[in-house]
Structures are given as C-alpha cells and as structure tokens.
C-alpha cells in the first residue's frame, strides 16, 4: 500500500525484519472475508506502518533475510514476490513476470525498482559482464524516470509512459542481458500541463543544473524562462531535488555507455524544445500569424543546424498538396492563423521529444544486449495507473484502456482459469462470482460493431482537414457504442463504465490527438538539418505511400497492448496490487471510502476467497 508520495522511515530496527504485526499479513487468514473486513485490516496495518513504501523495510539486511526463503516463512513483502519469481524460474525452468497495477500514485514505480534491486542482488555471477548488466538494469530507473515521469496533481513522480523490462538469464540463473519495451509516452505534456503540474523531470533538471558550457552553448537559464516549463505555475516539488537528480541522470547515462557526444546531442534537442515553446505569434493585418521575436527562431535554426529563413517560414505557413485520382497534384503554401501556428509549433516540439525518448530506449537496449545465450526472462511491468480527472481526454482513455487489458489478464488467470480448472478436475467447488471486464475492453477496441477507437479512426478519415468537424463526426459515430450498458453519451462527452469507476471523457481535440501525424514540413526540416543526430531521429522517407492510411495513436496503443498481453501470458505471473490511501499525498491519512473503492474494483475479496477455498500451491506429480 502506498503511503504518501515518497518513502517514509518505519520503526524497523536495523538488521532485522522482525516487527510486531497489526492485523493479518496473509489475508486468506482473515476470519471473515468481505470487502469491509479487508478494508479494516488494511487500516490497522496502515496505522501500524505495516505498509510497503517504508524505507525501513528495504535495507540490505531485510533484503538478505528473504533470500532462499519460502513465501510462507516471512511476512509478505515486495522482496518475497521477487524471491518467488526468481526461484521459480530456476526450479521450474519457466520465464516469470511481475505485474504491478493500481492507480496513479499508488506506488507501482517504487515497487518495480525494489523488484529490480532484489533480483540484481540475489542473482548469481561475479564476472565483469554480469556486474555490468546488473548496473545497467538499475541505471535505467533514474534515466527513464527523468525523461518519462512528471509531477501531476496526484503523484509527484508519475510515470507518463509504460515500461516492460525483461531481464534475461542463462540456464544458471545469471543475468546476461535485458530489454525494455516502451508504451505510449504522454508527449502532449511536453507542450502544456494543467495548473500546478510539471513537464517531464528532465526539463527542470537541465534548466536548474546544466553546466556552464551547456548554458552558453544552448542558451539555457532557469525553468521560469520557458513557457513549456513555467506556464502551469509549478517549478519546484517537495522532496524532489532536481539538481541532485540531474547528477543521477548523467551518471546513469555514463553507466549505460551513452557517450559524451551523444549526451551533447540529447541536451541540444532538449534546448530546441524549450526554445520552440518561447516562439510567440501575433496577428498580422491580413489575419495571418507573424513571429513576434525573430531572434528566437534564428537561435532555433542555429540549434537545428538549418537556415534561419526555413524556420521562420515553417512557423507561420504550411505546405499543402492536392491530388487527383491518387496522383500528386499542385503544391502550394497556406498561411496559418495564430492558433494554427501555435499548434504546428507544439507539434514539432512533441515530435522531437517523442523521437528522442524512443532513441534513448533503443540506445539502452543496445547497451544491455545479451552477452550470452538467454534461457529465461523475468519481466517487470511498470505502467501508468488508472486515471480519473475533472477533465479526461484521449490520454486518459488510452491509459485506462491499457489498465482494463491488465485487469483482464488478472481475471483470466486468477479468477476464471482457476475455477475452470477445479471444474475440469471434478473437484467439489462452489462458484465465486466476479465481474469479467472483457465487455469493456471490447467496447473500446472492437472493430465490429465499432468500438470507441474504431469510431475515432472513422472520424479522422472522413473529416481530416478540420479538427472541429472531425470531433463532431466522432460524436455521431459514437452512437454505435450506445448498445453497451457500459457506455453513455451526451453534449460532446461520453462516459465509459470502467472496472475502476465511471469516467467522463471530452471529445474536443480527441480526433486530432488520435490522428497524431507528423507534418511533412516538419519532416523536411529535420531531414534537411546539418545535424546527423536529428536526421537519425526521423529516418522515414519523405515520399511515403499516401494512399495507405498511416496508423493512428489508438491503432498503436491497441497493437502494443495486445502484444504486451501476449508476452505476459507466455510467462508465469506474480502480482502486486498497489492501493492508494488518500488523494492528498499524505503519509498519515487513510481515506476509508477511497480505499474500500479500490479493494472492490481490484477484486481482492473474490481473489482471497478463491485462494482460501482453492489449491493455491500445486505441482505436477513429477
């Protein structure tokens, strides 16, 4: 259970994991199994600091006490899950995965880091190459947190992307490599955040702690100097030291083997994005946009290594192409109004950051490439938690869809398959009811009848030139979803009844976010650069097949989610269900109603009943 936003010290004595327990640590031992009884037990344990984000239970002596122990020998712990996965991989010669789920701010990222730390500590091998892999695996945490996490209203270190880390082992249980798969970076955060949230951590680290050489070369000053880092009104976060974490980020780059020249290029891209946000427009006499300060666009041209006029022109106009019967027609320039110019400027900034993040993941994977043949993997999934805000858009829909898919795996493997096995084995069994959320997954991802994603794609295809018309078209096409009792629509909004609660989504801007296409002008700009690093971020050819519709953002997240499910189903799963005690990031507040809601939708009661009534441990006769 998460307690506040940063780990707090508990009253564990150094060198021991013995502590007087409150409530019941193994909830299959509760005398009464109801949602209310589970909630009360969690409350007692919370009051006694028997929770899993206390620093005192993550010392090296505590870690060592779980090594080679059966899960029943010691109190439940993140280390016990990691130990079980590691030993099962060796004993049964099967790949394992740890699926960590819960709401945003409930402690998923911290739990994932502890899993990795444990496995790095207890896995064998003293050779330099194995030590190098272990160090790199741990270094991915500060690096990807800097570029992929941000302060939100609910979580000071919120993952704004999904990450599946697969640690590869040889037959002797020694780590020989690792690979990271990245999911849906929230790139819209680069260009705007809601009040009192922040951009990605790296921008505040860079602007507060950059070397003098970088400040001179890239024109860097404090975060208050840039629209993309200051507009939401939050420059500092309690308990986050941006200067120290910047040092950790650079150290992680060094451990992974990112060269100083590559680090220079990364910082050049970050500076370009910051300066793009400072390009401001006014309306000319003809109603078209005009750049207010040409000095800024000239500096961006210097950073991008392109001609100043190229950047100035790109900011206020767009190249359009007519076509007839599939043939290319006339090419002409269309001036942009102020709103269109801002949108195009933001589009370039988002594209550069998105490609940069992908480059970092690829570069990390190259560094961690298996040093020897791998036999098994242990996968650790740390992915954005379920989100319900006052205003929910495309990003929340995608995040909540992925969480529905993960909930479906949990249901399939623990509630559905378990009971079906007892029926097959002809074991006397009283069925335990549960809600199967497959119906909600189908509502979002189905092609026929069209689900929400299909409706979005159709709206993009039929009204591609006008985002407002596309949003109106989406509203009409969503009528096809009203057959589902888990869907409602009204006044430019729609509600999906998710397993974790009802969420109201606003259709305004959804189709544009879903379309997510790189403008040809932006591609031409980056490919014409004298900077080979920037060119490498945009490897696609200029003349792509225009007849074929490029995949939309929802196409990509749907494909990624289904590939993730396939991967997870190929491994033996362990689960960590994180619970958030309150919405105020408080280390001492326990919101009964809030926790009870999570206990219910996570299906803890049904799962505990099945574990208690069923056969939680089983092996083949052999």
Image (cartoon, rainbow, N blue to C red):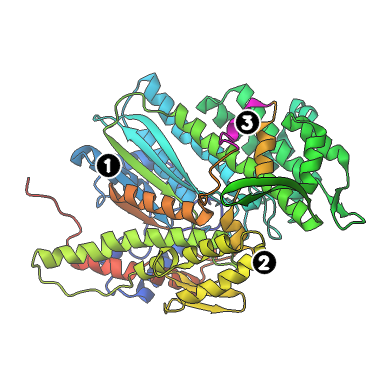
SS of the residue at dot 2? Answer: helix
Tell me where residue 173 appears, x and y as whole percent.
27, 32
Q: Residue 541 in magenta?
A: yes
Is residue 282 shown left or right of residue 34?
Answer: right
Q: Please determine whether, in this image, residue 182 is positioned above or below residue 499.
A: above
Q: Residue 175 in magenta?
A: no
Quadrant of image for the N terminus: bottom left
Query: Which residue was labeled with disc 1?
Result: 95
Query: Which residue was labeled with disc 2?
Result: 468
Tell me where residue 483 appears, x and y as whole percent.
42, 79
Is residue 139 shown left or right of residue 337?
Answer: left
* Numbered label tally: 3
Query: Which residue was labeled with disc 3?
Result: 535
Label 2, residues with CA under 10 Å away: few <14, some 14-19, many ≥20: some
Q: Of callouts 1 and 3, which one flags the residue occurring earlier in the amino acid sequence? A: 1
Going 71% across and 41% down the picture, which residue do you hit?
Answer: 273
Going 18% across and 66% down the picture, which residue do you hit?
Answer: 420
* Residue 229 visible (yes or no): no
Going 52% across and 59% down the picture, which residue do you hit?
Answer: 104
Mark-to-mark CA distance, 1 and 2: 48 Å
Q: Please determine whether, in this image, residue 339 is positioned above or below residue 163.
A: below
């Amino acid at each position: 259970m998460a307690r506040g936003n940063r780990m707090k010290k508990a009253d564990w004595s150094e060198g021991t994991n013995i502590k007087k327990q409150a409530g019941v640590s193994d909830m299959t031992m509760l005398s009464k199994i109801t949602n209310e009884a589970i909630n009360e037990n969690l409350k007692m344990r919370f009051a006694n600091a028997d929770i899993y984000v206390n620093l005192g239970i993550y010392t090296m002596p505590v870690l060592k006490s779980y090594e080679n122990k059966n899960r029943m020998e010691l109190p439940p712990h993140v280390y016990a899950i990691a130990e079980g996965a590691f030993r099962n991989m060796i004993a049964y010669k099967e790949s394992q995965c740890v699926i960590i789920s819960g709401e945003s701010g409930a402690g998923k990222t911290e739990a994932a880091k502890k899993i990795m730390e444990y496995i790095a500590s207890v896995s064998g091998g003293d050779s330099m190459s194995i030590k190098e892999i272990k160090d790199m695996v741990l270094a991915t945490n500060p690096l990807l947190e800097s570029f992929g996490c941000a302060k939100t209203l609910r979580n000071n270190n919120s993952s704004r992307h999904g990450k599946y880390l697969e640690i590869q082992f040889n037959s002797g249980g020694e780590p020989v490599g690792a690979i990271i798969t990245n999911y849906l970076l929230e790139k819209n955060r680069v260009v705007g955040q809601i009040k009192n949230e922040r951009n990605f951590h790296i921008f505040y680290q860079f602007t507060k702690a950059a070397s003098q050489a970088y400040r001179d070369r890239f024109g860097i000053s404090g975060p208050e100097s840039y629209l993309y880092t200051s507009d939401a009104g939050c420059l500092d976060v309690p308990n986050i030291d941006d200067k120290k974490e910047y040092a950790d980020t650079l150290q992680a780059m060094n451990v992974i083997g990112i060269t100083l020249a590559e680090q220079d290029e990364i910082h050049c891209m970050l500076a370009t994005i910051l300066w793009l946000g400072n390009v401001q427009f006014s309306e000319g006499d003809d109603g078209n946009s005009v750049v207010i300060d040409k000095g800024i666009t000239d500096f961006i041209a210097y950073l991008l290594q392109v001609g100043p006029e190229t950047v100035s022109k790109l900011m206020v106009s767009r190249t359009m192409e007519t076509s007839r019967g599939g043939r290319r027609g006339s090419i002409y320039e269309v001036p942009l109004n102020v709103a269109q110019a801002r949108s195009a400027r933001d589009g370039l900034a988002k594209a550069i950051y998105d490609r940069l993040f992908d480059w970092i993941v690829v570069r990390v994977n190259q560094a961690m490439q298996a040093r020897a043949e791998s036999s098994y993997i242990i996968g650790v999934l740390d992915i954005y938690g379920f989100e319900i805000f006052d205003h929910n858009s495309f990003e929340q829909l995608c995040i909540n869809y992925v969480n529905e898919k993960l909930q479906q795996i949990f249901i399939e493997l623990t509630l559905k398959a378990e009971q079906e096995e007892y029926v097959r084995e002809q074991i006397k069994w009283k069925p335990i009811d549960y809600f199967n959320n497959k119906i909600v997954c189908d509502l979002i991802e189905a092609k026929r009848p069209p689900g929400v994603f299909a409706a979005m794609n159709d709206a993009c295809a039929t009204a591609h030139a006008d985002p407002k018309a596309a949003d109106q078209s989406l509203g009409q096409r969503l009528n096809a979803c009203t057959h589902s009792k888990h869907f409602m629509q009204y006044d430019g909004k729609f509600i999906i009844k998710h397993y974790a609660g009802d969420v109201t989504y606003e259709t305004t801007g959804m189709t544009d976010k879903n379309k997510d296409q790189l403008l040809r002008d932006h591609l031409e700009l980056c490919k014409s650069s004298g900077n080979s690093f920037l060119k490498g971020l945009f490897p696609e050819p200029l003349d792509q097949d225009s007849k074929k519709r490029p995949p939309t953002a929802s196409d990509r997240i749907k494909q990624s989610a289904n590939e993730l499910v396939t991967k997870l189903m190929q491994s033996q799963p362990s689960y960590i269900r994180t619970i958030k005690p309150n919405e105020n990031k408080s280390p001492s507040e326990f919101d009964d109603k809030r926790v009870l809601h999570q206990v219910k939708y996570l299906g803890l009661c049904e799962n505990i009943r099945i574990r208690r009534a069923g056969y939680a441990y089983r092996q083949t006769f052999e």
